[in-house]
Image (cartoon, rainbow, N blue to C red):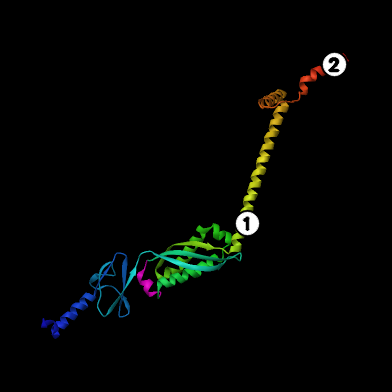
Amino acid sequence: MNLFFTPLGLIVLGIIVLVLMGFNVLREYERAVIFRFGRLARGIFGTGNGPGVVIIIPLIDKLVRVSLRTVTMDVPPQDVITKDNVTVKVNAVIYFRVVDQERAIVAVEDYLYATSMMSQTTLRSILGQSQLDDLLAKREEINSGLQRIIDQQTEPWGIKVTAVEVKNVDLPQEMQRAIGRQAEAERERRSKVIHAEGEFQAAQRLADAANVMSQNPVALQLRYLQTLVEIAAEKNSTTIFPIPIDIITPLIKGFEKKG
């Protein structure tokens, strides 16, 4: 037991601790950025930068772990003034991941914070160039534009932005009422147009029927007889119906000849 408290035992124990400090196990989605005397380096004995076991020189090398998984980040609500001078509050969500771990650590101090700030400023800039109607209706185009611009800005940091989604667009109360009145007026306009088109089609069909009957008087008489049948089917005490002039025309001509 006293062997561990001897100078030789303490030296051996210190060497074992230093060796164990040099071993690092990285998961499949992790990569290591190693600094040796302040310069970028790789793990010794061919271990590279992961995943798996990465061996460094204790007290000389410094290892920084970087995750390559996709990060989901909420962009806080931003006050945006649209191109048509409407103030709205918009928030979004951004999906990105690290594709170059060395640039993500060396090129920027904190890539998570930097990406968040870049997303906020780009959100205000792009949406400020859009009309309110486009912001509400053309959501896919706006998302694509945001993703492309933010990805271009973060590419020097080794960050790949895969998607940007605008989640909520909060409108002022007066603007919500105005949009409601506009939607109601649009529905009223469509209702009147549909009603007018129905009246036009009905009038056109009646005109066609009148043309057919004028060319064939028998069709008019058949329609007249059908109307009489419909009237007789109802429970009326007295039924009055006119006699077509075509029926009594021969009688009128006979009386004229006798006169």
Tell me the residue that label 1 is attached to. 181
Residue at x 67%, y 37% (from the top left corner): 202
Residue at x 22%, y 72% (from the top left corner): 45
Magenta stretch?
99-108
Q: Decide if residue 180 is on the left or right side of residue 31.
A: right
Cα separation, mark 1 vs mark 2, equals: 72 Å
Tell me the residue that label 2 is attached to. 255
N-term-proximal mark, 1 vs 2 = 1
Q: Decide if residue 158 is on the left or right side of residue 188.
A: left
Q: Main secondary structure of the magenta part?
A: helix
* Element at label 1: helix
Is 141 or 201 nearer to us in this picture? 201
Q: Decide if residue 190 is on the left or right side of residue 257.
A: left
Whole-percent x, y for residue 150 in the image:
46, 66
Q: Residue furthest bottom?
A: 7
How many numbered discs, if any? 2
* Element at label 2: helix
Q: Residue furthest front?
A: 237
Q: Residue flagged by tag 1: what amino acid is it?
A: Arg
| Circle 2 residues within 10 Å: few <14, some 14–19, many ≥20 | few
Q: Quadrant of the N terminus?
A: bottom left
Whole-percent x, y for residue 16 in the image:
18, 77
Residue 250 location, quadrant = top right
Residue 72 location, quadrant = bottom left
Residue at x 37%, y 73% (from the top left corner): 105
Q: Residue furthest right?
A: 259
- State yes or no: residue 226 in magenta: no
Q: Residue flagged by tag 2: what amino acid is it?
A: Phe
Please give the label number shown on residue 237.
Answer: none
| Circle 1 residues within 10 Å: few <14, some 14–19, many ≥20 | few
